[in-house]
Amino acid sequence: MSRRCELTGKKANNAFAVSHSHRRTKRLQHANLQSKRIWWAGGNRWVKLKLSTKAIKTLEIKGLDAMAKEAGINLNHY
């Protein structure tokens, strides 16, 4: 499975690692992803998702149903 937030779609960013002599080599800045079990009240069960930490904070404000609807995902598959 890809390293991507399942609700927000966040993924790795291309960047440069810059040495002391200013040589630049390509690297990836990965999103801070966490596997979380979240209670889904609509389905009356736990749902396991791979989320970025920013998505976890937003989830507490908006709620799981609203964020899943925005992302266009069906929680019955999780």
Image (spheres, grey):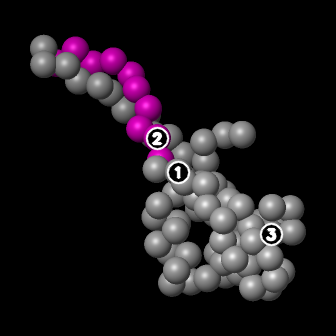
Residue at screen point 41% across, 38% down: 29
As measured in the structure, the alpha-carbon distance from the residue carrying label 3 to the one carrying label 1 is 19 Å
Residues marked 2 and 3 touching at CB (< 8 Å): no
As measured in the structure, the alpha-carbon distance from the residue carrying label 1 to the one carrying label 2 is 8 Å
Is 25 colored magenta in this rendering? yes
Residue 30 relative to residue 19: left or right? right
Q: Residue 54 versus residue 16: which sits nearer the camera? A: 54
Tag in front: 1 or 2: 1
Residue 29 relative to residue 51: left or right? left
- Residue type, numbered disc 1: Leu
For residue 33, the mark is 1
In the image, the segment drawn in magenta is 22-31
Residue at screen point 83% across, 80% down: 43
Q: Which residue is mark 2?
A: 30
Q: Local crowd at mark 1 within 10 Å, few (<14), some, or many (≥20)?
A: many
Classify the position of the C terminus by image quarter: bottom right
Residues marked 1 and 2 touching at CB (< 8 Å): yes
Residue at far right of view: 76
Vertical side of 7 occupied by 44: above or below: below
Residue at screen point 75% across, 71% down: 46
- Residue type, numbered disc 3: Leu
> Quadrant of residue 67 in the image?
bottom right
> Quadrant of residue 64 in the image?
bottom right
Residue 26 relative to residue 22: left or right? right
Of marks 2 and 3, which one's residue comes earlier in the chain? 2
> Quadrant of residue 25 in the image?
top left
For residue 75, the mark is 3
- Residue type, numbered disc 2: His
Residue 1 relative to residue 31: left or right? right
